[in-house]
Structure formats: C-alpha cells, structure tokens
Image: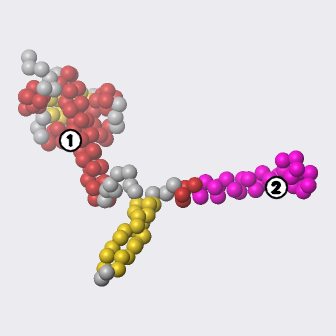
Amino acid sequence: MSFLTETVAIPVWLLILIIGGLIPLMMKLIKVFKSNKREEITKEERDNRVLLKLRTLRKSASPSKSAAEVAKEKNRDKARDKKIEMVHVLKIMAVEGDKGVLLKAVADRLNIGNSKVQEAMLQLSNKKLVEEVVGVSGTKYYLTELGKNYCMKKGIIKAQ
C-alpha cells in the first residue's frame, strides 16, 4: 500500500468510496453466479445429423405451489385452528360445569381475542352444544346436555 500512496496521491476518502461502490457490485455478481440456473447440453439426432442444444434448467428446492394450493392450505390451517379453539372453549365450559361462563373469562383464560371466542360460541350454540343466557352480570354460556354428551363422547371430559 505504501508504494501506491507514495507514487500517486489518492485520498483515503476516495479509496473508501471506491471500495464502498464495489462491494454491492461484487455481491450482485456472486448472486448471479450462484443463481438457480444450470445449463444442459442435449443431443438430438435428425436426418443423419446430430444437433447439440443448450437447454437452461432451473433448480428448485421444492416444487412450486400454485396460488390456489397455497390458499387452500391457508384455509385448511384456519379451519384447524378454529376447531382447536372450539375444543379449548368446550374444555373450559366443561370444567366450569353448571356455573356458566362469561365470554370475556373464556377469552382471558385462552389468551385469545373476544371475537374468536364469540365466533366459537356462536358455532357451538348453532350446534346446540352451548346455551346462551342473558343476565344482569352479562351473557353467560352454559353447556347443554347434548354438549355434555358430546364432550364425554370425544373425551374432552371424563364420564362421572
């Protein structure tokens, strides 16, 4: 470095600027060289002639999914999460027994939002597993006999 600085007066700030400009360029070149492209020479024989063709192949770590498959997978995950939340709500309802449970209490115990618990309660009440009773302290939810039988059948609560 001393030879360069003694023969040509190059300011340090200019060297830093040049190196700073070369780093992104070098990173881009490395990215291009390590890209997913791979070329393959194919050999075809036609009419007593041999044709060599260069074919570009793309390597992929996993097969790509279409947008419909991704959306279907997300919907499946959401449905599974809702079922899990409903089971947790039923467990809390079964533990409380005949006392009844407020929506906010279930949300606090499960550490999820009121809207998710409300949606689960709505589905459970549509299936007649939970009964909704409006009182002075708020709307309480009770497990119906059908709900108790369902919980026993699914193993959520043990038979008494």
Q: With respect to residue 90, does 35 lie above or below?
A: below
Query: Residue 46 at x, y = what percent?
Result: 31, 79
Q: Residue under circle 2?
A: 14
Checking the image for residue 122, the label placed there is 1
Is 2 included in the stretch rendered in magenta? yes
Residue type, label 2: Leu
Query: Can residue 68 be seen?
Result: yes
Q: How is the image coloured?
A: secondary structure
Task: Compare residues 36 and 103 and report the one nearer the observer.
Answer: 36
Q: Residue at x 18, y 42 (%)?
A: 123
Query: Residue 14 at x, y = what percent?
Result: 82, 55
How far, Cα to Cα, is label 1 from label 2? Answer: 69 Å
Q: Which residues are magenta?
A: 1-29
Horizontal side, residue 146 vs residue 140: left or right: left
Task: Compare residues 148 and 36 and report the one nearer the observer.
Answer: 36
Neighbourhood count class around disc 2 (C-alpha, 10 Å): few under 14, some 14–19, many 20 upward: few
Q: Quadrant of residue 157?
A: top left
Which secondary structure, mark 1?
helix
